[in-house]
Image: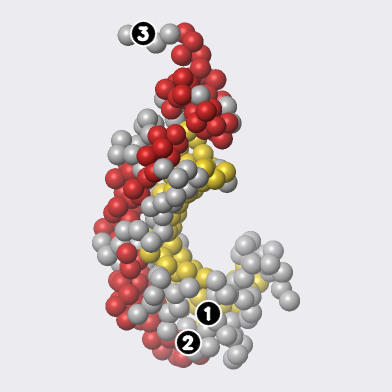
Amino acid sequence: MTKSWAYLSLKAVFQYMDVNKRLELNFHCPALRSAESSVPLKLKSLTLNKRKIVANAVCYKVESKSLRIKTILDGRKHVRVEILKVHNSSVIPDRLKISPRNLDSGNLDFERVLPFINRSSFPLRELRVNIAKTPNLKEYLGFTQTLILFLSNFDQEKEYLVRSILYDRKSPNIVLEYIRLSTNDTVALIQNWINNQKQIGTVLTMQPGFRILPIGFPNFDEFPNVFELLEVLNGRISNFSDSVLQNNMARRCVSFPLNRTSELVLYSVRDGPME
């Protein structure tokens, strides 16, 4: 049956309407729900929890799970979102596909979230996962440009999981949240990247807590064993300029030869002005 002009006009209006106003109309006007839900949502952020859904910083909290799904997500086929955080996947309707640029799977196994993600979204700009909850993470290294890893509890077994990701030649740029590498692990990682000729441009970031301090200082607290690294890995203290670091001012760093034309650089940076 051909859609009426009124229906098509409503779809055109919903396409340019503020997202949160659309959701309010969806909730209060059942007669408009079909037309509204047929137009893909375009969100800046979407967070899915067990008892609430947060869209563009507006919280929709409904006691009934079935009512919450029907009023916010059910009936939709596609949602586009810049930042998606999934803390509970049971609230996502089976037929819904979400297209995020950045995805945080929280404490869920990434494989539980994957079926709801539109495959055209890959590679993501950023993917944040709890590595302890996603044992098969190595299968998805190509799904993101930057991989953010965190752990709820760090132990020897989980330390092995982190190393296996860092050592993998296919691993993208990686950010370690509250995960520190020991001196031995740092030496082994640098040696691994040198031996396997890690792709030029790859970046490993450990955060938070970095400070901008010359790395050659003996009391440099981010890398207290820097001189041990220099000796073991044939490194040297040098300077480099980077637009991100102190407005193009030269910064001290530690450089390790990667090959004849490239080097691996270790440096520390913090946000905000120097004290």
Q: Position of residue 211 (x, y in %)?
A: 62, 76
Q: Residue at x 51, y 14 (%)?
A: 9
Q: Mark 2 or mark 1, which is nearer the start of the sequence?
A: 2
Q: Mark 3 or mark 2, which is nearer the start of the sequence?
A: 3
Nearest the viewer among 251 and 13 is: 13
Q: Mark 1 or mark 3, which is nearer the start of the sequence?
A: 3
Going by the numbered disc 2, the residue's amino acid type is: Leu
Q: Position of residue 143 (x, y in %)?
A: 34, 52
What's the CA distance linking mark 1 and mark 2? Answer: 8 Å
Q: Residue at x 30, y 52 (%)?
A: 112
Q: Tell me if label 3 and label 1 are in contact, CB under 8 Å.
A: no
**Residue furthest toward the front?**
63
**Residue furthest toward the right?**
275
* The label number, if any, that marks residue 230 in the structure image: 2
Q: Residue at x 32, y 8 (%)?
A: 1
Query: Is residue 252 in view from this perspective?
Result: yes
Q: Quadrant of residue 262?
A: bottom left
Secondary structure type for disc 3 = loop
Q: Position of residue 86 (x, y in %)?
A: 41, 51
State the count of labels: 3
**On screen, 227 above or below 98?**
below
Q: Tell me if label 1 and label 2 are in contact, CB under 8 Å.
A: yes
Secondary structure type for disc 2 = helix
Nearest the viewer among 260 and 69 is: 69
Per the image, the residue denoted by label 3 is 2
Going by the numbered disc 1, the residue's amino acid type is: Val
Q: Residue at x 34, y 39 (%)?
A: 93
* The label number, if any, that marks residue 235 in the structure image: none
What's the CA distance linking mark 3 and mark 1? Answer: 68 Å
Nearer the observer: mark 2 or 3; the answer is 3
Q: Position of residue 17 (x, y in %)?
A: 57, 27
Per the image, the residue denoted by label 1 is 254
